[in-house]
Amino acid sequence: MHESNCDGVYGAKKVWKQLNREKVEVAHCTVRRLMKDEGLSGARRGR
């Protein structure tokens, strides 16, 4: 899912929400941990 959304823009929060919409029950902390383990992160904005 991370790769399929405009070059990996989604962070853990959006990935978690999308999984819940698709009826995949998973904890937010699990999504964060798995993304961290794989070296994935969302787009950073700001300064």
Image (spheres, helix red, strand yellow):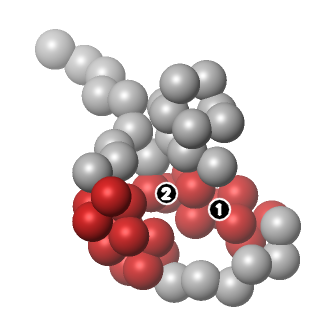
- Write the residue at 38% across / 79% down: 29
Q: Residue furthest top?
A: 47
Q: Amino acid at mark 1?
A: Lys
The crowd level at tag 2 (other Cα within 10 Å; few <14, some 14-19, many 20+) is some
Horizontal side, residue 34 vs residue 36: left or right: right
The residue at which mark 1 appears reads as: 17
- Quadrant showing the C terminus: top left
Label annotation for residue 28: none
Rendering coords of residue 11 (x, y %): 44, 47
Horizontal side, residue 36 vs residue 12: left or right: left
Q: Quadrant of residue 3?
A: top right
Horizontal side, residue 9 vs residue 17: left or right: left
The residue at which mark 2 appears reads as: 13
Q: CA distance from mark 2 to mark 1?
A: 6 Å
- Write the residue at 44% across / 57% down: 12
- Write the residue at 83% across / 67% down: 22
